[in-house]
Image: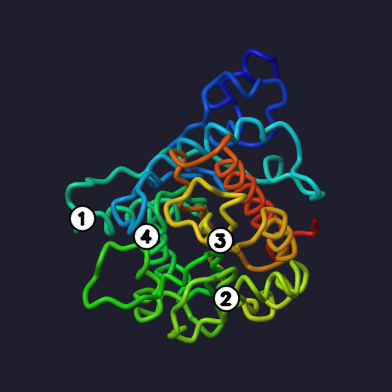
Amino acid sequence: MSHSRDWDNAFTGDGLRGKVEHAPSYGGALSFLRRRFSRDLEGVDVAVTGIPLDVATSNRPGARFGPRAMRTVSSSLAWARPWPWDIDPLEVLSIVDYGDCQFDYGDPASITPCIERHIDTILEAGAASLVLGGDHYVTYPVLRSYAKRYGALSLLHFDAHSDTWPDRGERVDHGTMFHHAARQGLVEPARSVQIGLRTTNDDTLGFNVLDARWVHDNGPEATAQRARELLGDGPVYLTFDIDCLDPAFAPGTGTPVCGGLSTYQALEIVRGLAGIRLVGMDVTEVAPAYDSGEITAFAGVSLATEFLCLYAARPGAETSP
């Protein structure tokens, strides 16, 4: 492949697999990991899609710009196999950048079904979704779509907050959606795990919690091992709120909480989860207006790339980190 074609692989790529080795990170079309922009899902394993929503945030807005920021910095990660994996998801998975979900921000009641239909289209084509948020509420309509296909899911939830606070209705709120997901049977709390929590919510709704202190005391390897035990062998949806990381590693987010995980801890936990039956994944709450040197966006993209590795290493694969 010539350098000129590599430069804009998002438009000129003639296949859905393979690294882009010669395009500088400062030029070219900024799709996610320089994957081809496409709404054609035939033969696609993973559709990367942005959901630029932040009307559900309770603190600082700005996560609507998260998908754009993560696409931009991802250009520097498209040239080599992710370390320390012996599998390259860009070589073994057919991945497209599916663009962003469109919705009417001025009509809150329409947002949830609109996102759900967007994900329905991806799943009905036989692909999995890697969602770039957007505030964390976007995970709720995504789970509604996945539950129609897989039944109650195991939720693998990285966050500073439980997001299980109750409300009396069906709020578009990034702090209540997993309360609804549990009550509606979209996820099964007994075989789900929340990692990195460090805010007070005494009602766990039956979710298993490995809070930030547990992770710091026991380390990434033990955290991954315990999470695997809790998740079992059923279908797993992985959601990562970037504020799971300490603000020192992810300042660019709407509701930062001190005392969180380091980027290294988070990456090592994810690597230790190879072999879970991962069916879908997202990274949410990257808000670039509060970022410093794009470190939050880089953390989000690095985690998303690890999730692609996990998906490539799901049961039936022979490779591991």
Task: From the image, state whether disc 3 or disc 1 is nearer to you.
Answer: 3
Tell which circle, 3 or 4, labels the residue nearer the N-terminal end.
Answer: 4
Q: In this view, does 144 lie above or below 308?
A: below
Type of residue at label 3? Cys
Residue 38, disc: none
Q: Which residue is drawn at 80% across and 56% down?
A: 321
Type of residue at label 4? Tyr
Q: Do the residues labelled 2 and 4 touch (CB within 8 Å)?
A: no
Q: Which SS class for mark 4?
A: helix
Q: Residue at x 30, y 43 (%)?
A: 102
Q: Which SS class for mark 2?
A: strand
Between the C-alphas of marks 2 and 4, the distance is: 18 Å
Please state the horizontal and vertical placement of residue 280, each as a whole percent of the image: 53, 59
Q: Is residue 256 above or below residue 224?
A: above
Type of residue at label 2? Val
Circle 3 is placed at which residue position? 258
Circle 1 is placed at which residue position? 108
Give the colour scheme of this rendering: rainbow
Between the C-alphas of marks 4 and 1, the distance is: 12 Å
Please state the horizontal and vertical placement of residue 19, each as a whole percent of the image: 70, 32
